[in-house]
Image (cartoon, rainbow, N blue to C red):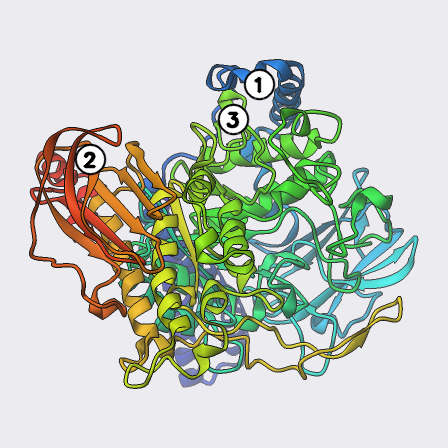
Amino acid sequence: LQLRQRALRHRQAKLTWTDDSSRRLRVAAEAANDGGAELAVGDLEAEAEVIEAQIKALREENAKLREQMIFTQEGPKVVPPPGEGKRIFDTDEYLNAHRIHLEYRFGQYKKLRWEIDQHEGGLEKFSRGYEKFGFNRVHNGIVYREWAPGAYSASLIGDFNNWNPNADIMKKDEFGVWELFLPDNPDGTPAIPHGSRVKIHMDTPSGWKDAIPAWIKFAVQAPGEIPYNGIYYDPPPEERHVWKNARPKRPRALRIYEAHVGMSSTEPRVSTYAEFRDNVLPRVRDLGYNAIQLMAIQEHAYYGSFGYHVTNFFAVSSRCGTPDDLKSLIDAAHGMGIVVLMDCVHSHASNNVLDGLNMFDGTDGQYFHSGERGYHWMWDSRLFNYGHWEVLRFLLSNLRWWLEEYKFDGFRFDGVTSMMYTHHGLQMAFTGNYEEYFGFATDVEAMAYMMTANDMVHGLYPDAVTIAEDVSGMPTLCQPVAWGGVGYDYRLQMAIADKWIELLSEQTDEQWQMGDIVHTLTNRRWMEKSIAYAESHDQALVGDKTIAFWLMDKDMYDFMALDGPSTPRVDRGIALHKMIRLLTMALGGEGYLNFMGNEFGHPEWIDFPRWDFTTPAGKFIPGNGGSYHLCRRRFDLADAAFLRYKGLNDFDQAMQHLEETYKFISSEHQYVSRKDEGDKLIVFERGDLVFVFNLHWQNSYTDYRIGCNRPGKYKVVLDSDEGRFGGYNRIDHNASYFSQEGWHDGRPHSFQVYAPSRTAVVYGPADYEDPLIEYCEENPETDECRTYDE
């Protein structure tokens, strides 16, 4: 790279010298009043304009090279070859009964990898389809390619050619790929100006249509118009974001702040990437989360879909800003040490024909399965054909694009259950019987795609994170592909949120069973990591309720002021909101997730702006008048010192910092020593900490003996009853707790505590020292230790 830069600078210097010479000749010709010299100088000036354009191009290339040099520590782009796929049978003996299916699945994946190696030069090259398809700038023009095998003819139209369908006709090759080359203007500027609207005009089996290019990088909905327009996005260097920060290392345990940029403002409107960067990122950092998961990044025509009906897979959501605005957000997060994950939708696509992929070339089965198999009746969306070569190129390149161009650190894959089964999990009650996972209902082509996708992501970016949203509990989902697994790093532990809603909506506190709660929190597959959450965006949507709203309901409107009266419902809600979240975080998985605003008990639900409409079947669906009133986040409530929301917010911050200090989520030591149905107590160890949860609605217990593994002196390290968290200060934080030898609740040591009602208290060793300190004294130059020092 340095040699290349040196060569570019040398050529740039020579071109600049020629340009200066032409200017000196112009001055000399004017002084001599020589017409012939004037003509010669005119030729030189024309040449100089070309040289100016070349200099500009060289500067752009130089900037890209500098950027590449900054991030060379990301390592070589190599995807390792497939493994043997056998180790899964050692980790789970029940899989042996389904060995034929699993070996066939792994064989289909290996076959796909082999074919990519043979015909495309390997997965690394195959996943860079965006360098071939869509719009690509070359040294003397723009090349545009589109895969549309069903189209009879195609041309590129847009502002640049006055939307003339006969001006720029495309040619089709034997693979159904249409191509067009647009040479630069005589002055060296591109034929399509930056920001121009573009579409592809096609004669298809379904008639003539104007479509947004499938690989478009930016799409915008003009005011007063319904369909989106593709935008040729190629800003000048001064408008492009210059990356400043390298990617953070993958955290030992993910603490994820799930966020939606558009609804992140306190005001009833669509927020922007820049506002999120300046206003929300500092909040996330101060709370102590080490990752954010951004929803609704891929362009979607319908705002109310929460980003899950994607129309343009390579384009950022233009409601919130430009591609460079998003890059600035991600760069700022990296500078704060925050990992950035994208909520990726490859399970289905928008049903839109005008601005999406549906019927793109006029046929039903280009990107999707044709007929019923290609339609999701519940989501009203199209389902990808993961067995088609060009669909694989499109989806794998899409993942690579977001990793390379925007420097995302990984993905949360939406709708994985729908991908894995031909019944899409609809009207299925998964019981854990392995016959439900391995059979003819499994979509092996989709499984092979996901295995290849995880191979590609982890091969190119070893620190990248992939998370699967799966409700079925598919075995091997989060085991390495080389072992025979599907390759995700984590699965979302979706049953936990369902359990809390069940308890809050159907049972009184007296009916809660401690064993049932513990079972739900700990019921996860061995050697497969999970992300636990008490609630996500799903529970916050209109039609459902957040935990805070289930607990406090309408009392949240009138009794949340600290200088005013409270109610038993609010008191109960404040106490249980904290306990539920800490219990979920401490016992539920190897990572934790929270949806923005829920950390402080955000009131009400999320309701996107929508209008009245009537379905094709004649059913009237009322809207909300297009209001954004319930499509925002009231962070101002958490900042108000006179409201009880602040105590909930501060407790969530204390939870995150407790985990950062003691790293209990990543600890392999986890032991539940007590599940007392009469006392309503849950006691367990995680790492070096002992957690005590008294869920009884009125009983407090003095001198309550709890077991522990580690002997010595303990202290209180977190107390949900602390006054600043909205509690009653019933725990003495200056007290010391000394363990005694002798078995208790299956533990070799024990100590006595005071356990107030509806309170969670965490005890830690008084002599605790972060294990990283000793490690960093011996290895001070490692990335982990430099970050730790900062």
Give the Cα distance between marks 2 and 1: 36 Å
Q: Give x and y (percent) for residue 437.
A: 65, 29
Q: How many marks?
A: 3
Q: Which residue is mark 1?
A: 95
Q: Is residue 430 left or right of residue 407?
A: right
Q: Secondary structure at mark 2?
A: strand
Callout 3 crowding tier (Cα within 10 Å): few <14, some 14–19, many ≥20: many
The mark closer to the camera, 2 or 3, is 2
Mark 2 residue type: Cys
| Mark 1, other Cα within 10 Å: few <14 / some 14–19 / many ≥20 | some
> What's the residue type where badge 1 is placed?
Leu
Vertical side of 161 occupied by 378: above or below: above
When the figure is inspected, residue 313 is found, relative to residue 625, above or below; the finding is above
Q: Nearer the viewer, residue 157 or 395?
A: 395
**Which residue occupies 51% across, 48% down?**
412
Can you identify the residue that label 2 sits on? 708
Q: Which residue is mark 3?
A: 481
